[in-house]
């Protein structure tokens, strides 16, 4: 049989659990993409970043991106060092456009800070 003190403690803990659950159950925030530019390339080397069909060097190269090429990501985090991006004609290009899309190696993209 459970004594009153244990019962009260259990109720208090359950109430705290419910209260915390209410705080943690906030509406999901949608990710609207982030702007990046191609950066950190070796100007004495190839000086381009490959846009690929998937996140691996084994995937087909779609196009080559030069320094400062504007990009928009659609996921907040990369996968194993790769980011899925759209290649933009200019920074702040409309979201509704049809742009070349693919995967780039994250090491060579820098976030745009305003």
Image (tube, rainbow, N blue to C red):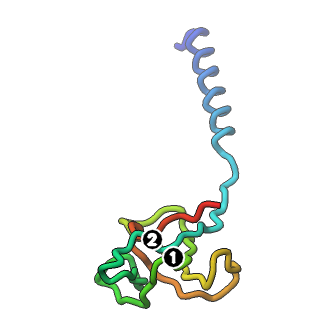
Percent x, y for residue 50?
A: 39, 83
Percent x, y for residue 27?
A: 70, 52
Give the mark nearest the N terminus, 2 or 1.
2
- In the image, residue 111 sits, relative to residue 23, either above or below, namely below
| Residue 23 or residue 108, whichever sits in front | 108
Left or right of residue 67, residue 19 in this image: right
Q: How far apart are marks 2 and 1 (CA)?
A: 6 Å
Q: Quadrant of residue 33?
A: bottom right
Q: Residue 101, which numbered label? A: none
Quadrant of the snapshot with the C terminus = bottom right
| Residue 12 or residue 79, whichever sits in front | 79
Residue pictured at 33% horizontal, 85% vertical: 59
* SS category of the residue bearing label 2: loop
* SS category of the residue bearing label 1: loop
Q: Quadrant of residue 62?
A: bottom left
Q: In which quarter of the image is residue 30?
A: bottom right
Which residue lies under the disc numbered 1? 68
Residue furthest to the front in view is 44
Percent x, y for residue 73?
A: 55, 71
Which residue lies under the disc numbered 2? 39
Contact? badges 2 and 1 (CB < 8 Å): yes
| Residue 7 or residue 70, whichever sits in front | 70
Left or right of residue 52, residue 113 in this image: right
Percent x, y for residue 48?
A: 39, 82
Q: For label 2, count other residues whose C-alpha is less than 10 Å away and answer few (under 14), some (14-19) or many (20+).
A: many
| Residue 1 or residue 88, whichever sits in front | 88
């Amino acid at each position: 049989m459970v004594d009153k003190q244990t019962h009260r403690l259990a109720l208090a803990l359950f109430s705290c659990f419910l209260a915390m659950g209410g705080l943690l159950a906030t509406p999901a925030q949608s990710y609207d993409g982030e702007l990046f530019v191609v950066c950190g390339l070796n100007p004495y080397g190839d000086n381009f970043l490959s846009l690929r069909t998937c996140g691996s060097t084994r995937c087909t190269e779609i196009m080559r991106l030069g320094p400062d090429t504007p990009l928009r990501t659609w996921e907040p985090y990369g996968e194993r060092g790769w980011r899925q991006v759209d290649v933009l004609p200019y920074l702040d290009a409309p979201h509704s456009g049809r742009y070349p899309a693919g995967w780039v190696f994250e090491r060579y993209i820098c976030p745009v800070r305003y």
